[in-house]
Amino acid sequence: MSSINSSDIPLDLSTCASEPIRTPGAIQPHGMVLVLERTTLAVKARAIARPDVLDAYGDPLGHPIDAVLGGALAHCRPLLAALAAGTTQFLGAHAIGTQGVHQVVAHRVGEDVIVELEEPVAGEPGSLEDLYPAIRRFMEAIEHAATLTDLCDLAATHVRQLTGLDRVLVYRFDEDWNGAVVAENRNEVLPSYLDLRFPESDIPAQARELYRQNRVRLIANNDYQPVPLVRAAADAAEPPIDLSPVSLRSVSPVHLQYMRNMGTGASMSVSLLREGHLWGLISCHSQHPRRVPYHVRTACEFIGQILSLQITLKERALGVEQRIARRAIQVRMLARMAGDQDFMAALGRDQDSLLALTESAGAAIVHRGECILHGQCPSQAQVMQLVQWLAAQQREGDLFVTERLPSLWQASEAFAEVASGVLAISISQVHDSFVLWFRPEVVRTVRWGGDPRKEATGMLTPRTSFEGWKETVRQQSLPWSAVDRDAALELRAAIVDIVLRKAEELAAINEQLLRSNKELEAFSYSVSHDLRAPFRHIVGYSELLWASASERLNDSEKRFLDTIVESAQSAGTLVDDLLSFSQMGRSTMGQISMDMTALVEDVRHKLDMEYAGRSIQWQVPPLPRVQADPGMLRLVWQNLLANAIKFTRDTPHPAIEVGHQRTDSEDVFFVRDNGCGFDMRYVDKLFGVFQRLHHSDEYEGTGIGLANVHRIITRHGGRTWAEGEVGSGATFFFTIPFAAGDNL
């Protein structure tokens, strides 16, 4: 690196990000550096600013550490020999002749041991212990800091008190490495930068990495003359020496010009790390050149470490609090979803929870071609276009997130007002199924320390580079936090888990149904061939016995014979009903358009014998046509009308009404009678197999008829229910959806 002293020399900023800042080949002039060969501890390179040191002690090149500088560092040899790679150690304060007491620090970088000796500063504290009261006051104060802003304000105040510099800033990086000044403490010498933002290019990536590795950096004079690192002639072809950890390391001339443009003669920075990553800086400025003593810098570094820990704790605590709140929301949503057959519909039933999960203004659920909107959203057509665009994008994982959608997809400018920010999760590998959350455009003004759009070419211009510049940000939402993203991903994982679990349950049910069907087929065969024939034989032989021997039988024997015939006939009827119930679940549905009025009248005509000799008042209005299986619907009407006839048998003036209502999605039919009715406490038992609410001595039947009705209507996609009152009659309802289907 060449030496730059004048602000009149133009600088090419295009090479700033690639400068060899780790190997500048020079140091700042307020000290000296010796580079030692690791095994012999002989000096292989040196940077000494003061000629009188060389005059007094000679050139240290090629000599062992014991013999240089009048042997001032001889007793440090064991510590230097034991220094581990990548470490730094403070070796104490050492007097170098008439040059005063120097603070000595050693670094091990690869195969080099670097010793830096920093010249004394008038009035500097003798040790770090002298500064402990100031550090303790800071530690006591931070216990009462409630927010990150309070912490940063405290750090800025205490660092300025320690250093006596003109301005101390706390500077925080965003996710794009732009910086914002979040706290400031200053006198009136330098202007305020509070709330200003600075572009990422002000601190290039390699400079940020050095900030991460070295917590403290001091530039004592923006016009210093760099002191070159001199090597022995024999080592001239060796690679440049890495001075990364060295405090005296010379800095980029571009940065020195940057300081001059800011009007700062000296600067110091303390890095703030969060879990090993660069969070921000404590940036300190003086209008005039000024050195901050080693122990003061160490105290400021300690304050920076304490602040870093507090930042980590505060942000982690806030994150935990937010995650707990989001997890509670998620638990409520999953409880609804897990207990619902249509879990995707259940996801949207609690709109408030769906939006609160990611703190969004709107959400959309897109699944199998359907789009359901909640809150403030684009139109359904726009959401479907967005889903098509998302499906075509190459993205990592199943999460898409942006707070600047219009900058990625121009078509979204049409709905940027409601959806500049989008967070989306893909919930299917087969279909274009997404859950999307939207955040509206937030128009805001950002104050920059200079125009961030200006191209950095040619010479940096003082007076204008740091003038405040306002930018109005549009088509951009509030940013999505890590908590928002994690909540969305956790919901996706839960949805996928539910889908897999439902699939496993369905597979198990299907397997069970296959086994049950086979068992039913075997049972049906057994019933048909092993039970029905014996019952017919019992009835037949009983009738033959009656015909041939009735004259010889007394009244008791005749009653016994009648009971045998009646029981055998009842058992045969039960077997027939069981076969019918089994067949209802296994037979194929053939749906056609059918006239319900004609079907009801035909069934009623065939039931004439059931109420022969009785006067029943019938009400059968015109009924609509439906799409259904005619054989199955005939059995439904037959069971319902037969029940109405049976249970009005003891009613003085029996009345049976057939009715119909139409909703937006289905036809509702009912059969109402004024018979014996039933107790509504037992309504849930009505449509079960063998469930009877009346004793068989009162009303005959096997308890399978209504179970058949329920099974048939369920296969058509409809519903069944009943209403009744003891002694006042009952009403039985069933529905046929407009788009009926086999829902077995």
Image (cartoon, grey):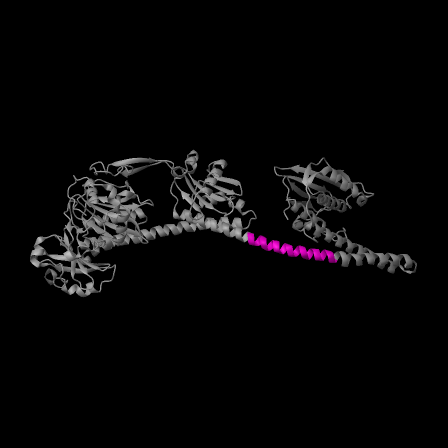
Residue 479, position in %: x, y?
A: 38, 43
Could you say which is closer to the camera, residue 462 or residue 641?
A: 462
Q: Left or right of 513: which side holds 91?
A: left
**Residue 427 on image: x %, y %:** 49, 47
* 163 displayed left or right of 734: left
Residue 499: x, y in percent?
Answer: 53, 50
Q: Residue furthest right?
A: 551
Residue 543 visible from this viewpoint: yes
Residue 102 occupies quadrant: bottom left
Residue for point 76% across, 56% down: 528
Residue 232 part of the magenta segment: no
Q: Position of residue 540 (x, y in %)?
A: 84, 56
Q: Residue at x 80, y 59 (%)?
A: 534
Residue at coordinates 41% horizontally, 50% vertically from top-left? 323
* Main SS class of the magenta portion in the image: helix
Whether 665 is drawn above or below 551: the answer is: above
Relative to 25, residue 414 above or below: above
Residue 513 among those drawn in magenta? yes
Q: Nearer the viewer, residue 88 or 54?
A: 54
Give the extent of the magenta segment: 503-526
Q: Say if residue 653 shows up in the picture.
A: no
Q: Is residue 184 above or below residue 513?
A: above
Compared across the picture, whether 177 is left or right of 518 comes to left
Foreground residue among 32 and 306: 32
Left or right? Give the position of 15 relative to 589. Answer: left
Q: Is residue 71 above or below residue 627?
A: below
